[in-house]
Structure formats: C-alpha cells, structure tokens
Amino acid sequence: MREIAHYLVHGATGFDRTCAALSAIPWIEPCEHIDGVRHYLDTSHRTLLHQGLVLECDRDPATTRLALRRSRRLHLGAAWSDDIPRSAVDILDADARQFVFAAIRSERLIVIGERAARVAWLEIRDAKDRPVARAVVQQFNDGLHASTPIAVRIYALPGRRTAARDAAERLRSQLPLDETGTPMDPHGIDLASANLPAAVRPRVPAVADSDETGVALRKILTTNFHVITSCEPGIEADLDTEFLHDFRIALRRIRSLFDAFRPLFDTRTAGLLKADLKWLNEISGGRRDLDVFLHQFPELQRTTPRRYADALEQLRDFIVTEREYAQNRLMQEIADERYRVFMADWRSLLEYPRLTGEGYDEPVTAAAAASIWKTYRRIRKQIRAPRSSASIDALHALRKDCKKLRYQIESFRVLFPRRRLNRAVAELKQLQDILGAVCDLSVQQTFLVARREQMLERLTDPTSMAQLLETLLHRYAAAEAKLRRNISTDLERFASKDVARRYRKLFASAT
C-alpha cells in the first residue's frame, strides 16, 4: 500500500469523534483499532538507524502492526534509551519475530523509543462496493501536550491508486481539517509515519526536447537507478511487496532503454550490462510471482467451496513458505559480489554527463520516436504472424515486447502531445492487461503442477488437498482457455490500421 493523502484534523474534534464521523460515511467501514503503545525498534548496533531507517511497531493486546519508516524524520527526544529492559521479542509474536530477524539479519531487536498511540484502520470502498483504500486515523501523545493533532492518512490498495485518489478527494470535503497544520507539526504528530521511501514513486525525469539523446538517456537511467537503490532497504525488510514491484519496474525500464539504444553503450559495457540486467530480472521474478499468487487468496477464499477451507489454508501456508525461500535466495544474491560489482559499474557509468556511444548527439525527440515506432512495428508483425496466439510462449514473448513499448513511451512521454499519447498508452494497456492475466494463470498452473507432489507428501491425509489442487487447476485452465479464445480480438485491435495510423502519426512523423 502507498500513502496518497495526508490530512490533519482539528485537535478539538477528538480521536473518537473523528473515527465515528468516518464510520458514518456509507462507503467507509471500520476494520481494526489500536489503543496502546507505539514502539520504535532497532538492532543493538543501530543498524537500521545508520541506514536512516527504523522499525515501527503498533501494539495493543490483540494486534501487532509493523512498518519500515524513515528515522531521520523521527523525534524520539528523551525516550531514547539502550536500557529499556526488554528486547523487541517481548512485543512481537513468534511469526513476526522470525520474519523480522530474518529480514534484517539480526539476533536481537531493542526498543529505542515509545509513544502512546491511538490508531484506527478503516476500509474505503468505491461505487461498486470494491475496497480501494485504507483510511488510517492516528493520534499520538508525546507526554508534553494535552491535545495533540489527529492525522488521517489514505493508503491506496494495489492497483486501485486512481479510485483511491478520487475517494480521498471526496473525503477531504467531509473532514474538519486543520488547515494551519502540516505533516511536520512537532506537537505530537508522528513524523515517521510517511511511507518509505517517498522518492521511490516513479517520476518523469527532467528530459527536454533540446537534449541530445546521450544526455536525455542518462537522465532517465539515473532516475531509474535511484529507484533501484532506494528500494533495496524495503526489499530487505520485506514489509511491503511494492518495494520489489517498483524495483522490477525500474529494472525493466532500464532493460528496455538498453535494448533500444544499445549503440550508445560501448561494447564491453553492453555485454556486462545485458547479462547482469537479465540476471537481476530472473532472481527477483520468483518472489514476485508468489506475491501475485498470495494477493489473489482473498478472492480464492471467497470463491472456493467451504469444504476446502482447511486445504486452502494449507496451500497458502505452503506458498508463504516458498515465498520465504524465494526472499532468502533473493537477499543472498543481492549480498553477492556480482550485485556489488553491477551497482558499482552503473554508478561509474552514470557519473558522466552523457552517454557517448553511437548517436549520442542526435535530437532526443527524433531518436525516441524512431525507437518507439520500431518497437510498435515489431509487435504488430508478431501479432499479424499466423497463429500468433497459439502457444503460451508466443504470448509471453509478446507480453515482454508490450512492456518494452510501454516503458519506452513512459520514459519519453514529456516529449509528445499528452492527449494523443494517453490514448496510445490506453490502447497498449488494454492489451497488456489481458496478456498479463493469461500469463499469470499459466505461471500459477505451472507452479501447482511442479509442487503438487511435494505438497501432498507433507500431509497425513492428502485427499482434500489433492481435490483442491485439481479444482484450482481446472479453474485456471478454463479461465486461461477462455481468455485465449477471446484474445484474438484484442490482438487484432492493437494491430489494426487505425491504431497503426495513430502510432505512425505520433511517432513516425516525429523522426
């Protein structure tokens, strides 16, 4: 989840009245409530604080919430202490303790600060009654002020960013806001609760039409390299799947630009980077596939017959374990010398003001347009080939090229007319969505088939699990077959003369 809005409510309103007012809105439902203590955690050697981070733990008798935060914005004041007489193991349940210890590679966590906290989680739904965001109401008491501000933060659920923003704007008009307050108000407001790291959100680099291609490409690569390095602490702590998601998107953007503008890299650098970029994509892909699988479990629980409830929970436990293995393997690879050399090579490459290979001094708009038009033509040729949707491998390859096209367009979008570009992206996104759904179903079937014997061997009575797996495989196969029967329409639409004409007018005419 990502924070998309942050409001301060007038202190006189009160925490309980704020929660009640929100709960009275028809499209908001209460979820959880914490009225206890917030603990700020670190290792005995201040490992996290040295990285500018801190583990934040909200706890009441029934609930424990963990989050990774920026510590440089955290005011602990006199609460700093090495001798708060308990390790954090006393306030984390066994699963959470093992999770955190493995993530930050520490034998012990300590409490470095604490503050009284009142926190309520509420669920925001859209007009179709689908959850799109969480509203978090927070009030903190630093012991110095009788009345402290109340914060309402809105976090978008994965894939619901636009709908969540709309809901946040609607909510703004219904809150008694303290317009004079700011998120940095020192009087009790929690300064550490902004999501980490704020700068990770992909942003359009400051590319200008007057830039040479070598200069513009370096700007874009630097921005995406910053995303990769900023995501590393979040991936290691493993407290939000979005860190790995952003990491992989930045990685794919770099790969797509590297493929499109390879002559700008010298031969030796090109060989190294191609191999390492592919390696990073492979080592991070396994965990991401399992993240996607786990994200779908609420829907599985809703649609699977109740007689399979226990088996479904066992399946989820198995996938969680597999994900932990994948996370550990990923962290071992990131700790490897190869990754450090890769990062050093990129830092060295991006120290120069421009890339100086072949074509570096060409106007960027013409070079970008030519690259995008070439990629679109390649995709159109694939689609128009006989039986282009006959095999899942062909669809996988097509999906990869569609991603390359999308990332190239997004990287250079400031150079082209916004309205026409948005239409081109919308047409591409529609095709990407259906290709993604088909490929995800294929990946999940492959996983279940490959792990079926392993899962069944662990159970004393595997009958229910075997039946559940057959049910899921049949469901996934039927869903994939249905999508593939209908996908030809989407492929033909994207390869049609009308779409080709729009892409030609937008990009080929700019070369």
Image (cartoon, rainbow, N blue to C red):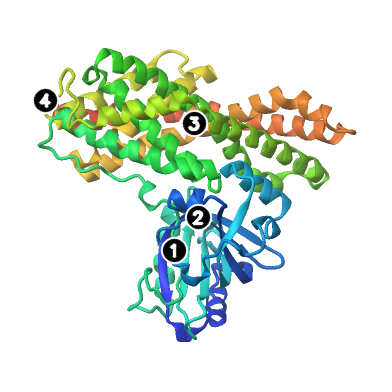
Tell me the element at label 3.
helix
Q: Secondary structure at mark 4?
A: loop
- Residue topped by disc 4: 361
Query: For mark 2, does the 10 Å Cα neighbourhood hold few (<14), some (14 to 19), or many (20 or more) residues?
Result: many
**Would you call the spot at circle 4 few (<14 residues within 10 Å), some (14-19), or many (20 or more)?**
some
Which of the two marks, 4 or 3, is nearer to us in this view?
A: 3
Name the element at disc 1.
loop
The quarter of the image holding the C terminus is: top left
Q: Position of residue 208 (x, y in %)?
A: 15, 40
User: Are the residues tagged 2 and 1 within 8 Å (C-beta)?
Assistant: yes
Is the residue under label 3 in contact with that under label 1 (CB below 8 Å)?
A: no
- Amino acid tagged 1: Leu
Q: Which of labels 4 and 1 is toward the front? A: 1
Which numbered dot is residue 370?
none
* Left or right for 203, reference 59: left
Among numbered discs 4 and 3, the one appearing first in the sequence: 3
Q: Is residue 50 left or right of residue 32?
A: left
Query: How far, Cα to Cα, is label 4 from label 1?
Result: 46 Å
The answer to which of 438 and 112 lies nearer the viewer is 112
Identify residue type, mark 2. Answer: Val
On the question of residue 293 being in view, the answer is: yes
Circle nearer the N terminus (4, 1) = 1
Q: Which residue is mark 2?
A: 54
Three-letter residue code for mark 3: Ile
Which residue is depicted at the point 46% across and 27% down?
281
Q: Position of residue 400 (x, y in %)?
A: 42, 25
Residue 334 numbered mark, or none: 3
